[in-house]
């Protein structure tokens, strides 16, 4: 059993798929952090003007890859990952 687990983890397909998934997650995180910074900047500009805009609540949960269905990286992750995992 231990030998089979070792062979499956050291497999080149498994390593490539893990690296691919990590790259998608990092790109999604970078995209969402940039979006969050833009939202914070615009809200601070409204606060300086004395306005109180109605805006949706933005936090780590609403920007999570499992919750975000509009981003291209989350779609890529959920459509391609099951197909890639079958290759292993």
Image: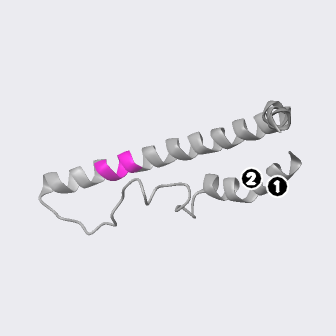
Q: Position of residue 86 (x, y in %)?
A: 85, 52
Q: Position of residue 7 (x, y in %)?
A: 85, 33
**Viewed as shown, does residue 34 lie left or right of 66?**
left
Q: What span is in magenta? A: 36-40
Q: Nearer the viewer, residue 40 or 48?
A: 40
Kindly identify the residue that appears in the image at 55 percent across and 55 percent down. Answer: 65
Which residue reaches farthest left?
A: 50
* Callout 1 crowding tier (Cα within 10 Å): few <14, some 14–19, many ≥20: few
Kindly identify the residue that appears in the image at 49 percent across and 55 percent down. Answer: 64
Q: Residue 33 sits in which quadrant? A: top left
Q: SS of the residue at dot 2?
A: helix
Tell me whether the residue at label 2 lies in contact with that at label 1, contact meaning CB atoms closer than 8 angstroms.
Answer: yes
Query: Looking at the picture, does residue 14 appear above or below residue 32?
Result: above
Q: Which mark is residue 81?
A: 2
Q: Quadrant of the C terminus?
A: top right
Q: Quadrant of the N terminus?
A: top right
Label 2 to label 1: alpha-carbon separation: 5 Å
Q: Residue 10 sits in which quadrant? A: top right
| Residue at numbered disc 1 | 83
Q: Nearer the viewer, residue 23 or 10?
A: 10
Q: Position of residue 49 (x, y in %)?
A: 14, 55
Q: Nearer the viewer, residue 55 or 65?
A: 65
Q: Main secondary structure of the magenta part?
A: helix
Magenta residue check for 50 = no
């Amino acid at each position: 059993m231990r030998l089979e687990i070792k062979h499956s983890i050291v497999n080149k397909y498994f390593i490539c798929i893990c690296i691919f998934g990590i790259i998608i997650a990092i790109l999604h995180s970078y995209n969402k952090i940039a979006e969050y910074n833009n939202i914070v900047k615009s809200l601070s500009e409204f606060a300086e003007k004395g306005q109180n805009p109605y805006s949706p609540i933005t936090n780590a949960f609403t920007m999570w890859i499992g919750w975000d269905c509009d981003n291209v990286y989350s779609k890529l992750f959920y459509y391609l990952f099951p197909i890639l995992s079958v290759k292993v």
